[in-house]
Image (cartoon, helix red, strand yellow):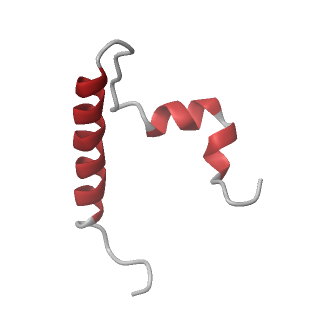
Amino acid sequence: MIGYPDYILDHIKLDKKYENLKMNKSDYFGNNLAFTRYSFRRTFGKLRKKPLNE
């Protein structure tokens, strides 16, 4: 598929990528907070990694 990462079609890899994201189908506000936390952790975790172009 053009424009999508390979893990999208692999359920095991997809589950592994989002294993730390917990969602509740009846808690819209809580889901937004959970996704924001997940996104911040993921983004700030990248800050400690070495740049790819170095």
Q: Position of residue 16 (x, y in %)?
A: 47, 34
Residue found at the far right of this picture? 1
Residue 37 in the image: above or below residue 40: above
Q: Residue furthest front?
A: 28
Q: Look at 23% across and 25% down and name the residue there.
A: 30
Q: Position of residue 5 (x, y in %)?
A: 63, 54
Instruction: Name which quarter of the figure residue 49 lies in.
Output: bottom left
Q: Position of residue 31 (x, y in %)?
A: 30, 27
Residue 7 x/y as whole percent? 62, 45
Instruction: Answer with left or right where residue 5 lies relative to residue 37.
Output: right
Q: Is residue 16 above or below residue 30?
A: below
> Which residue: 39% across, 15% down?
25
Where's the C terminus, which quadrant? bottom left
- Of residues 48 and 43, which is closer to you in this image? 43
Total marks placed: 0
What residue lies at 22% left-to-right and 41% top-to-bottom?
A: 37
Q: Is residue 42 above or below residue 21?
A: below
